[in-house]
Amino acid sequence: MTRTISTSMAGVLERLELERPTIVTSEKLSEILQDEGIRTPALVVAARLREKGWLLPTPKRGAWEFVPASSAGAYSSNDPLLVVKSLMSKHATICFGLTFQTAAWMHGVADRVPARLESAAGDIQSSRLLRQRLSSSMFSPRLMYNEIKGVPVLAPESVIVHMTEKPRAVRSWQSALEWLPDLAALLKAELLQEELEYRCDAVVARTGYLLQGMRPDIADAVYKRDTPKYKTWFGPRAPLLRHDNKWLIADTMLPFDPGKMDAIGSTTGCFEDVV
């Protein structure tokens, strides 16, 4: 497809080529049109640019993907983060970070990104917006979000604590074994302790229990600082899969024994048949 440039749109495309935004919003387009002295409504211009292949639709109304002239044609970049970037472009105050397998992929320790991106919403309003397009659960990290590829991502320590604070939010603990050990290898003891600060005893106990095989150094530090005093459930109150006397954990959820995982990610009899 040959993408032509009309005389009236030359200035608009020149600005877009110069700034190279991944997402163009109707507000941004209006700003450019005003600067160029063009009175045509932004939505009309967007329709024309879409027709010529300069803009492509995104899941968010009023936001389009810009396809620069350097691209082979009017083809999407197939950026899996496009849905996130389009949400951010339309809702500047949205508070969230990518989490679980999506965060592991962003940190470079998961081989693939899930079909539906996973997010941790910092407030109710953000959660409502995110749930329209992403998998979302509520979680407020103590640590700052990491910015990767232009989007907020939970720090590795925050991802682990999100998993232990909301274990039922994890889509598949079995699949998590593909990236969890490598994510655990990225953890820094002082940052994990900061993320656990002021969290309830149950979250602290679950975190130590989960990390005891993969990161015994960190688990031991957690244990010394906050020795478990009460029984904690890992999962719903259901028939036990295992009980950990050290961490006082009643585990009804995990399809593996965290205590039998080693520090480099391989396992020694950690898989169990769960009926």
Image (cartoon, helix red, strand yellow):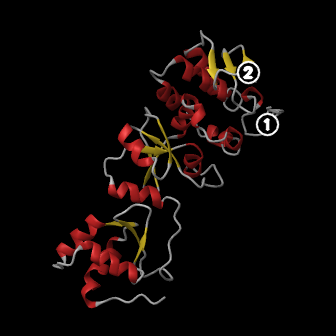
The quadrant the C terminus occupies is top right
Q: Amino acid at mark 1?
A: Thr
| Residue 233 located left or right of residue 134 | right
Rendered image quadrant of residue 270 = top right
Location of residue 211 in the rendering, given as x and y in whole percent from the top left corner: 65, 29
> Relative to the observer, which residue lies in front, 207 or 230?
230
Location of residue 71 in the rendering, given as x and y in whole percent from the top left corner: 48, 79
The nearer-to-camera label among 1 and 2 is: 2
Residue drawn at point x = 47 percent, y = 53 percent: 133
Q: Cβ–Cβ below 8 Å for labels 1 and 2?
A: no
Q: CA distance from mark 1 to mark 2?
A: 24 Å
Numbered circle sitting on residue 253:
none
Up the image or down, 68 lies above or below 116; here it is: below
Residue drawn at point x = 55 percent, y = 47 percent: 103
Mark 2 = which residue? 239
Location of residue 26 in the rendering, given as x and y in whole percent from the top left corner: 29, 67
Numbered circle sitting on residue 267:
1
Query: Of helix, strand and loop, which one carries label 1?
Result: loop
Residue drawn at point x = 55 percent, y = 29 percent: 189
| Residue 203 located left or right of residue 245 | left
Residue drawn at point x = 60 percent, y = 33 percent: 168
| Residue 244 located left or right of residue 1 | right
Q: Amino acid at mark 2?
A: Pro
